[in-house]
C-alpha cells in the first residue's frame, strides 16, 4: 500500500508527528481499514523523502497508542478498533476532541477535566483482557465479594502504602464504580442528618452527592494553606459562615492537591485538621486524594490518612484520572471502627465493578504496568506543563499564575480585576475555551474570589497549547 501524506516543511510540527497525525486521522475516519497492511518504514521513508528514523518514530507512536500492530516477518497492519471518538479538524492540521454540546468555533479547549488518552496503553490493556477471557474462567461471571475481589484490594493496599503512605489492610478497602457511588455508599455508613464542611471552591460533583443525600453543607473559604480550620470554631465562624448551620460532623478535603485551587496543604494545617477530628467523638475527615500522582516539583506529598493514629480519616481515590475515565474503578478506605457499620448498613450491596474489570486492573497493577504508565504520564504531563508555562510568559504582566507544581491545570488570576465573564467571552471570540473559577464555588452568587480562569492541558498536544496561548494573548492583551 502506498500512502499519500502531505508534508509541510515550513510547519513547526515535526515531520514524524505530521506522519503520525495523518495516519491516525485516516484510521479514525475509516479510510484505512482494519487489517490493512501499511508500507514498511523504509519504503515510506523513501516515498516521502525523509529519514527512516522519522517514519520509525511515527510508527512507534501509532504502535504505542494501539492504532497499528506489528506482525513479525510480515509488517505493520491497522488495528481493529471500534467506537473511536469523533474528532474535529483543526485549521492547523491538529485534532481537537469535542465534548457533547460544545459550540462550533472552539479550536482549543483548555478543559480541566481532560486526560491524555493518546498515551493510554491500549495494547497492554487489550492483551490482559484477552488473556483473562481466554482462560475460560466461568467464576468471573458470577457475583463476587461485595467489597471487591480480595486480590485487587490487596494490590490497591500495597500500592497505596508504598506510593501514598496509606496504612490499612485489604479488609478496610471497598471497591466501587467511581467516586460518586462510593460517596453515596459512605453516606449510608455515616448516617443521615449530618453537617459536612467542604472547601470552597471545591469538586462540585462531591458537593452535589452530599446534598442529594440530605446533608447540610458548610462551605468554608480557603487561605494559602487550604481549608481554614479556624473557621470551624463556632465563636470565630458564627459571623463568617453566612448560613450558620452549626458545627460540622465531617470535613471533606483534598489535602495533597486541592481541586480546583491546586493548593498542597502543609503539615501544620493537616495536624490542625486531625486535632479538630479528635476533639469530639463521631467526627471524621473525608480525604479525596485527587490527582496526587502528578507532581512536578519535589516528591509526592504523603496522604493525610498516613498521619492518622485514631481512625478519623476516611480515604477515597480513583483510577479514573490516572488511567482513564471509563475505567470507573474507585476505592474507599474506611477506619476499622467504621467497618462494622459498613457491614451492617451496606455490606449486602453487590460490587458495582464487574469481576472481569477487577481482574484486568489487578493484573495491570501487579505486573508493573500501572507504575510504568504513571511514570510515562508524569513525563508527558510535565512536558505539556512546561510548554504551557513557557507560553504564558507573555501574560505575566496581567495575570498571577498559580497551581504550577502539580496536577494537570493552572489558574490565572487577573491583576487588574477584569471580570471572569469578560475574560471567558474574549477567549471564546478568539476560538479558545477557558473555565471560570466561579463554576466551582458553592453559592457562586456570593463568590469573593478575584477574577480567575482555569487552563487544563492534559488532553492537548504541545502544538495546540502554543496555538491556544497565542490566541489568548491576542484576546487578552
Image (cartoon, rainbow, N blue to C red):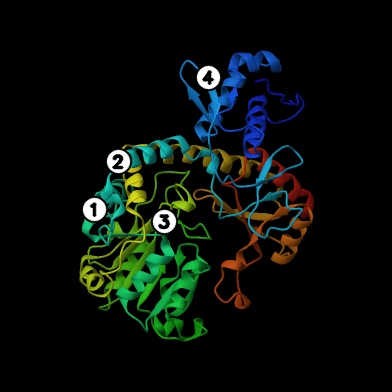
Q: Earlier in the sequence, mark 4 or mark 2?
A: 4
| Residue assigned mark 2 | 366
Q: Find residue 380 and report its horizontal and vertical position in percent.
A: 52, 38
**Image x and y of residue 365, in percent:** 33, 43
Q: How many marks?
A: 4
Discs 4, 3 touching: Cβ within 8 Å: no
Q: CA gap, disc 1 to disc 4?
A: 42 Å
Question: Residue 12, located in which quarter of the rendered image?
Answer: top right
Asked if the residue under mark 4 is in contact with the one under mark 1, i.e. CB atoms within 8 Å, the reply is no
Q: Picture quarter containing residue 344? A: bottom left
Residue 477 appears in the rendering? no
Residue named by callout 4: 75
**In the rendered image, the vertical position of residue 52 relative to residue 87, given as above or below:** above
Q: Disc 4 and disc 3: Cα gap in Å?
A: 46 Å
Q: Earlier in the sequence, mark 4 or mark 3?
A: 4
Return the residue at label 1: 150
Q: Earlier in the sequence, mark 1 or mark 4?
A: 4
Q: Compared with residue 334, is residue 125 higher up or lower down, i.e. above or below?
A: above
Amino acid at each position: 500500500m502506498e500512502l499519500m501524506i502531505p508534508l509541510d516543511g515550513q510547519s513547526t510540527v515535526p515531520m514524524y508527528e505530521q506522519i503520525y497525525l495523518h495516519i491516525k486521522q485516516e484510521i479514525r475516519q475509516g479510510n484505512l481499514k482494519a487489517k490493512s497492511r501499511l508500507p514498511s518504514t523504509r519504503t515510506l521513508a523513501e516515498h516521502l523523502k525523509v529519514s527512516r528514523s522519522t517514519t520509525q518514530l511515527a510508527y512507534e507512536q501509532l504502535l504505542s497508542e494501539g492504532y497499528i500492530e506489528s506482525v513479525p516477518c510480515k509488517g505493520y497492519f491497522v488495528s481493529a478498533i471500534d467506537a473511536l471518538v469523533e474528532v474535529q479538524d483543526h485549521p492547523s492540521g491538529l485534532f481537537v476532541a469535542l465534548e457533547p454540546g460544545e459550540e462550533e468555533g472552539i479550536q482549543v479547549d483548555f478543559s480541566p477535566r481532560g486526560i491524555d488518552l493518546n498515551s493510554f496503553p491500549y495494547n497492554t490493556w487489550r492483551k490482559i483482557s484477552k488473556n483473562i477471557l481466554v482462560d475460560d474462567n466461568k467464576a468471573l461471571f458470577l457475583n463476587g465479594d461485595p467489597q471487591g475481589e480480595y486480590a485487587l484490594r490487596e494490590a490497591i493496599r500495597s500500592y497505596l502504602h508504598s506510593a501514598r503512605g496509606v496504612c490499612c489492610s485489604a479488609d478496610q478497602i471497598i471497591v466501587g464504580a467511581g467516586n460518586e457511588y462510593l460517596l453515596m455508599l459512605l453516606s449510608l455508613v455515616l448516617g443521615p442528618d449530618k453537617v459536612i464542611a467542604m472547601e470552597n471552591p471545591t469538586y462540585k460533583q462531591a458537593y452535589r452527592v452530599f446534598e442529594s443525600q440530605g446533608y447540610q453543607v458548610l462551605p468554608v473559604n480557603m487561605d494559602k494553606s487550604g481549608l481554614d480550620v479556624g473557621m470551624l470554631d463556632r465563636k470565630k465562624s458564627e459571623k463568617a459562615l453566612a448560613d450558620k448551620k452549626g458545627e460540622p460532623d465531617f470535613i471533606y478535603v483534598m489535602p495533597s492537591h486541592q481541586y480546583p485551587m491546586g493548593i498542597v496543604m502543609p503539615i501544620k494545617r493537616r495536624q490542625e485538621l486531625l486535632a479538630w477530628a479528635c476533639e469530639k467523638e463521631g467526627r471524621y475527615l473525608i480525604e479525596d486524594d485527587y490527582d496526587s500522582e502528578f507532581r512536578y516539583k519535589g516528591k509526592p506529598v504523603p496522604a493525610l490518612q498516613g498521619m492518622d493514629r485514631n481512625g478519623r480519616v476516611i480515604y477515597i481515590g480513583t483510577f479514573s484520572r490516572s488511567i482513564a475515565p471509563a475505567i470507573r474503578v474507585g476505592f474507599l478506605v474506611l477506619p476499622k471502627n467504621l467497618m462494622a457499620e459498613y457491614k451492617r448498613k451496606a455490606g449486602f450491596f453487590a460490587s458495582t465493578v464487574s469481576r472481569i474489570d477487577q481482574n484486568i486492573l489487578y493484573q495491570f497493577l501487579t505486573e508493573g504496568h500501572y507504575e510504568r504508565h504513571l511514570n510515562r504520564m508524569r513525563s508527558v504531563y510535565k512536558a505539556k506543563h512546561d510548554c504551557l508555562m513557557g507560553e504564558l510568559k507573555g501574560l505575566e504582566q496581567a495575570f498571577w499564575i498559580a497551581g504550577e507544581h502539580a496536577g494537570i491545570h493552572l489558574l490565572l488570576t487577573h491583576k487588574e480585576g477584569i471580570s471572569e465573564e469578560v475574560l471567558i467571552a474574549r477567549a471564546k471570540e478568539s476560538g479558545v475555551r477557558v473555565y471560570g473559577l466561579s463554576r466551582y464555588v458553592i453559592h457562586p452568587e456570593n463568590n469573593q474570589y478575584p477574577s480567575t480562569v482555569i487552563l487544563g492541558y492534559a488532553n492537548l498536544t504541545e502544538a495546540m497549547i502554543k496555538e491556544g496561548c497565542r490566541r489568548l494573548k491576542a484576546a487578552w492583551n
